Image (spheres, rainbow, N blue to C red):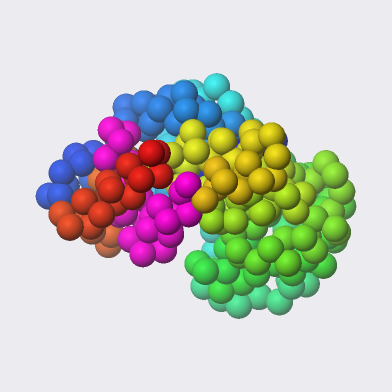
C-alpha cells in the first residue's frame, strides 16, 4: 500500500448546527464522501481513524462504517481497529475483516502507560491472530505514547506486520524507523505539514487529515517529479493543515470540507460545530490553498 490516504471523516446526520448530539452515521453521505475524495486523487482510505471520530462510535457503528467504505471504495481500505486493550482491538480487527477491509491500522493502547516491551508483545500477539495485515500507529499527541524506532524495527520482522503510520511529527525518528525497517515495510507519515520531507526521508506515503479537504493537493505532493516540487506542493496547504489538525480540530476539519461542498456531515458530542467567524476563516484558508 503506497501513496496518499486519509482518515476519512465520518458524516453524522444533519449538517446544521443544531444537529442532535446522538445523531446516527449518515451512510449515504459516507459513501458519497468516498467517491468525492477518490475522484480527487486519494490512493487508499482509512475509515475509523483518529479524525473519523472512531472513539465516539459503537462497535456496531465501526463495523458498519468500514463496510460502507469498503463497498464504495475503488482503492484499498486500511481500517482503524485499535482500542484501549487487546480483546476489543482483536474484535474490531475481525469485524473489519468481515466488513471488507484490506488491512488494520492499530493505534498504541491508550489511557494507561505501557512499556515498549509490553507494546511489542501486544502487537506480536495481535499480528499472530489478526485476519488482516497489521499496520502500527503511533500518535503521541492523542495517546501519550511514541513507539520507539527500535521497537518498530523488531516488529517489522513479523510476517503479518505490514507497515506503520507515524504521527509524531519527528522527522529524525521517522528516518530512524526507515533505517530499521525493510523496503517492503510501508511507512506512512501522519503529519501533513511534513509530508514532502517525510517522502524525501524514505516514506511510502501519508495518512493525512487535511486530505479530507484538499485531496488533490496532498496527491500532488506524492506525485511530484522532484523533492523541490513536492515541497512547493506541500507549502500550499501547510497553513490549512495547522488549522484543521491543531487550532480547530475535527469540527474545523468538517467546516473546511463543507466549504468545498464535501458531504462532511455533523460532528458528534462532545464536539461542537465551529462558529461563523471560524467557518469564514477556514473557508478563506481553503481558498488560499487551492489558489
Q: Is residue 61 left or right of residue 185?
A: left
Q: Give the residue at x 57% y 46%.
A: 232
**Quadrant in which residue 107 is drawn:** bottom right
Q: Visible in this render: residue 71?
A: yes
- Prevailing secondary structure of the magenta residues: helix
Residue 98, percent across and down?
Answer: 57, 32
Q: Nearer the viewer, residue 174 or 290?
A: 290
Q: Is residue 86 left or right of residue 50?
A: right
138 is higher (above) or lower (below) than 256: below
Residue 55, percent across and down?
Answer: 43, 56
Q: Quadrant of the C terminus?
A: top left
Q: Quadrant of the N terminus?
A: top right
User: Range of the magenta residues?
Assistant: 236-263
Q: Give the residue at x 32% y 27%.
A: 28
Q: Nearer the viewer, residue 64 or 104?
A: 104
Q: Give the residue at x 61% y 65%.
A: 168
Q: Visible in this render: residue 99?
A: no
Instruction: Tell how many labels.
Output: 0
Residue 53, percent across and down?
Answer: 40, 52
Based on the picture, tell me whether residue 228 belongs to the magenta stretch.
no
Q: Nearer the viewer, residue 54 or 148?
A: 148
237 is higher (above) or lower (below) than 249: above
Q: Give the residue at x 52% y 69%.
A: 141
Based on the picture, tell me whether residue 252 belongs to the magenta stretch.
yes
Q: Is residue 90 left or right of residue 249?
A: right
Residue 285, percent across and down?
Answer: 33, 50
Q: Residue furthest left?
A: 18
Amino acid at each position: 500500500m503506497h501513496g496518499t490516504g486519509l482518515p476519512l471523516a465520518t458524516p453524522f446526520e444533519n449538517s446544521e448546527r443544531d444537529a442532535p448530539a446522538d445523531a446516527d452515521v449518515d451512510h449515504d453521505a459516507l459513501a458519497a464522501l468516498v467517491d468525492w475524495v477518490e475522484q480527487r486523487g486519494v490512493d487508499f482510505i482509512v475509515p475509523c481513524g483518529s479524525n473519523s471520530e472512531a472513539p465516539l462510535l459503537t462497535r456496531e457503528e465501526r463495523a458498519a462504517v468500514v463496510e460502507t467504505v469498503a463497498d464504495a471504495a475503488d482503492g484499498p481500505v486500511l481500517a482503524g481497529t485499535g482500542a484501549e486493550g487487546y480483546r476489543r482491538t482483536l474484535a474490531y480487527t475481525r469485524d473489519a475483516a468481515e466488513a471488507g477491509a484490506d488491512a488494520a491500522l492499530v493505534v498504541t493502547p491508550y489511557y494507561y502507560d505501557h512499556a515498549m516491551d509490553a507494546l511489542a508483545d501486544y502487537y506480536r500477539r495481535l499480528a499472530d491472530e489478526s485476519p488482516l495485515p497489521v499496520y502500527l500507529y503511533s500518535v503521541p499527541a492523542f495517546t501519550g505514547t511514541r513507539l520507539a524506532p527500535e521497537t518498530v524495527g523488531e516488529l517489522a520482522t513479523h510476517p503479518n506486520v505490514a507497515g506503520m503510520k507515524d504521527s509524531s511529527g519527528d522527522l529524525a525518528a521517522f528516518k530512524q524507523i526507515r533505517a530499521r525497517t525493510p523496503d517492503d515495510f510501508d511507512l506512512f507519515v501522519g503529519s501533513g505539514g511534513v509530508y514532502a520531507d517525510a517522502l524525501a526521508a524514505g516514506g511510502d506515503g501519508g495518512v493525512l487529515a487535511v486530505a479530507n479537504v484538499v485531496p488533490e493537493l496532498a496527491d500532488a505532493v506524492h506525485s511530484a517529479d522532484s523533492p523541490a516540487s513536492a515541497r512547493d506542493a506541500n507549502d500550499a496547504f501547510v497553513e490549512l493543515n495547522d488549522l484543521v489538525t491543531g487550532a480547530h480540530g475535527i469540527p474545523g476539519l468538517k467546516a473546511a470540507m463543507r466549504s468545498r461542498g464535501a458531504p462532511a456531515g455533523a460532528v458528534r458530542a462532545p464536539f461542537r460545530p465551529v462558529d461563523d467567524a471560524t467557518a469564514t476563516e477556514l473557508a478563506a484558508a481553503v481558498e488560499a490553498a487551492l489558489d
